[in-house]
Amino acid sequence: MTVELIDPPGLPVPGVYRQVAVARGSRTVYLAGQVARTATGEPVGPGDLAAQVEQAYLNVATALDAVGGSFDDVAKLTLYLVDWHPSKLAALGEGVGRAQERLGCDLTRPVTLLPVAALAEPDLLVEVDATAVLD
């Protein structure tokens, strides 16, 4: 595995993400932000944060697969969430959980959550940006 995930002593162990990723490999992959769209560009889950998170994560997995990678190779995620409020945490977790179940792997990675006023299209609630390291 090219990415080792750790929660070092002296830092909190949040459970829903990891504090540190140590990546070793020969190829760094930077994905464009992935959103809730099908391969044909159709919107997924209008107004449904959990459905949009699930689809965005699935799209990250599809992009990684295209270059011979998987979520095991992800070193860092950045989530951009429209009008973020802590009350949305359950829907965010539900979407990640559903994607994790469908993909059959652990999606817990170092992550930065950034609240934003809007994304590129008005129906979008979340965008997921990933950096991966592959051998």
Image (cartoon, helix red, strand yellow):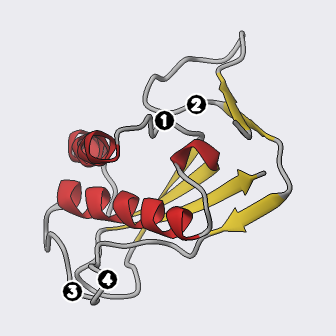
- Would residue 43 appear left or right of 81 to someone viewing this image? left
* Dot placed on the residue nearer the N-terminal end, 1 or 2: 2
* Dot placed on the residue nearer the N-terminal end, 3 or 1: 3
Gap between marks 4 and 2 measured at Cα: 30 Å
The residue lying at 19 percent from left, 59 percent from top is 51
Mark 4 vs mark 3: give the one in front.
Answer: 4
Label 3: which secondary element = loop
Mark 3 belongs to which amino acid? Glu
* Dot placed on the residue nearer the N-terminal end, 1 or 4: 4
The foreground one among 68 and 19 is 68
* Dot placed on the residue nearer the N-terminal end, 2 or 3: 2
Give the numbered dot on residue 18.
2
Residue contact between numbered discs 1 and 4, judged by CB atoms under 8 Å: no
Label 1: which secondary element = loop
Please name the residue that numbered disc 1 is placed on.
Answer: 108
Gap between marks 1 and 2 measured at Cα: 6 Å
The residue lying at 14 percent from left, 74 percent from top is 46
